[in-house]
Amino acid sequence: MRTLLVHRLGRVEYRDGLQLMQLAGDAVRSRQPPETDHLFLVEHPPVLTLGRGADRTNIVAAPAWLASQGFELHATDRGGDVTYHGPGQLVAYPVVDLNDRPDVKRYVAALEEAMIRTCADDGVAAGRHEEHRGAWVGRRKIGAVGVHLSRWITSHGLAFNVAPDLAHFQAIVPCGIADPRLGVTSLAQELEARGGAAPPMAEVEGRLAAHLADALGRRAAPAAAPLQTITVVALAQDGRVLLLKRSEARGGFWQPVTGRIEPGETPIAAARRELLEETGADVPVEPLGYRHGFGIDPGLMRSPDGQVRVAVEEAFVARLPPGFEPRLSDEHVEAAFLPAAEAAGTPRFPGPRKAIRLAAGLPAAAAPEPAPA
């Protein structure tokens, strides 16, 4: 029986979610480790995703409203139409090798079955709809499915509504289903109608992972704990953002201050230490209230072996004294103070870009392009 490694990462930027699936797909193909698949359990910030057959007119909200709510817009290679993801919705990305059971319908049915069983754990009777994919409570959809397969290795997966803001679904025609008799629901809404409350997200994650592993014929096992890291956005007195360029041996890209949390060290202590080590600034740091997970590019690891490694990063802001000039460590070869909007578009990865936007008081996401008329 193949092992299904379960990664529980909390908030993940959507683009980082795509990267996680790519890294896991490479690891599964190269059998590192052998007989091992991956399941990522995440929550995304507000985002609209368009499948291969999506009709952009199914995005009905105005771009200004989407921007005010912090929505992003992403095209994907999964099947299906327009889908919403956001806080309170559990998104599961199984990256599994189906060569042992190459049957797409059976795989999709397993995803649906995992959500149906998870509902049953809390006394909510869910099932399938005769015309539409997903998990349904009567005429209300509680979970969506959208998958992609490449040589029988899967990506994308399911989105299960635990306790999201259901008003956000009004931004789209969910999954392109325009039938006014059908709606969207959540575990929280169904349990509230029965006089109860939704269980904690962590509890739902555990149940869904167990049901999915069973439905797929896998043995679930917890993945190794994520690496704990920090990022610090250092601001000059005039609001410009200090960015550092890594050496070519370390990737050659621009970023804010970043680093690992050492054993026994608090995140805030690590943030202040890394700021001092990488720039020479010895000033207080303040939490930004932003924590996110991501996959680590094997090319940036000192001993890359092709296995999947993930990290969870906490963001901070620091305000530099007037006239501050950075003193670089051997990790970086150049420093620059950039206007906030320019700095927010410079780092290679979405997490640091989001941290800069938050530190500088910029909108959480740029306005999505309007759907064509």
Image (tube, rainbow, N blue to C red):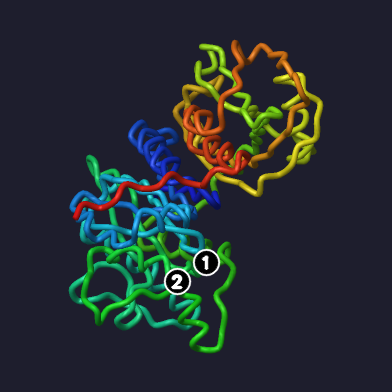
- The quarter of the picture where residue 301 lies is top right
- Determine the residue located farthest toward the front in the rendered image: 238
Q: Could you tell me how far apart the alpha carbons at marks 1 and 2 are, in whole angstroms?
A: 7 Å
At 31% across and 45% down in the image, what residue appears? 97
Left or right for 206, reference 64: right
Amino acid at dot 2: Thr
The relative height of residue 135 versus residue 329 in the rendered view (above or below) is below
Local crowd at mark 1 within 10 Å, few (<14), some, or many (≥20)? many
Q: Which mark is residue 204?
A: 1
- The quarter of the picture where residue 28 lies is top left
Left or right for 119, reference 176: right
Amino acid at dot 1: Val
Q: Foreground residue, 166 or 150?
A: 166
Image quadrant holding the C terminus, namely bottom left
**The residue tagged with tag 1: helix, strand or loop?**
helix
Residue 310 position in % (x across, y down): 53, 38
Residue 113 position in % (x across, y down): 34, 68
Residue 177 position in % (x across, y down): 23, 69
**How many numbered tags mark residues here?**
2
Q: Which mark is residue 276?
A: none
- The residue labelled by disc 2 is 118
**The residue tagged with tag 2: helix, strand or loop?**
helix
The relative height of residue 121 versus residue 70 in the rendered view (above or below) is below
